[in-house]
Amino acid sequence: CPHGDIDGAIKYMSTRNVQGIGIATCREIVARLDPSHDEFLLVIALFFWTLDGITDCEQEVIDLASWHRDLIHKEMHTHYRDELGMDDYASRMGELLSYVTLFDVSEHVKQHYEMFRLFGVFK
């Protein structure tokens, strides 16, 4: 493939995230939930400590990530129960945790860029 379809690749990447969910849909989900600053930071921390799809980690790193995720979940419970005075926050917390899987696309991004490279899109 001497000349890749650069325009097609740009169009694809600008209208879709790599899991096939439209960027507009992702924005709608975030806008609907409207996370507070604290909630957003907790989700970002969970992104950092989520090792799904990473297979070459030492057990020590896996244990450390698990410990941090547990700590973040406890902080989320404390935030809702003590700081916001919410008793029924399970659905809210569940929606926030769904962000992690919705936007966890690191492996998929690598796969798509490798596919584009193999087909000569970036030449």
Image (cartoon, grey):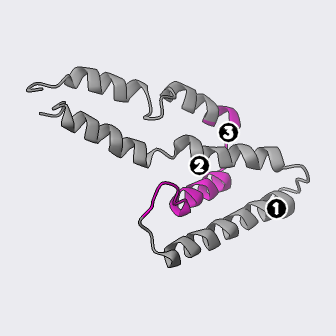
On whether residue 42 falls in the magenta region, the answer is: yes
The residue drawn where x is 56% and y is 32% is 26
Exactly how many numbered labels are in the figure? 3
| Residue underneath mark 3 | 34
Residue situated in front as seen by the camera: 31 or 48: 48
Disc 2 and disc 1 in contact, CB within 8 angstroms: no
Dot placed on the residue nearer the N-terminal end, 2 or 1 = 1
Q: Position of residue 44 (x, y in %)?
A: 56, 55
Residue situated in front as seen by the camera: 60 or 9: 60
* Quarter occupied by the C terminus: top left
Q: Position of residue 38 (x, y in %)?
A: 66, 56
The residue drawn where x is 80% and y is 44% is 91
User: In whole angstroms, how far apart are the C-alphas of marks 1 and 3?
Assistant: 18 Å
Mark 2: amino acid: Val
Mark 3: amino acid: Asp
Residue situated in front as seen by the camera: 18 or 39: 18
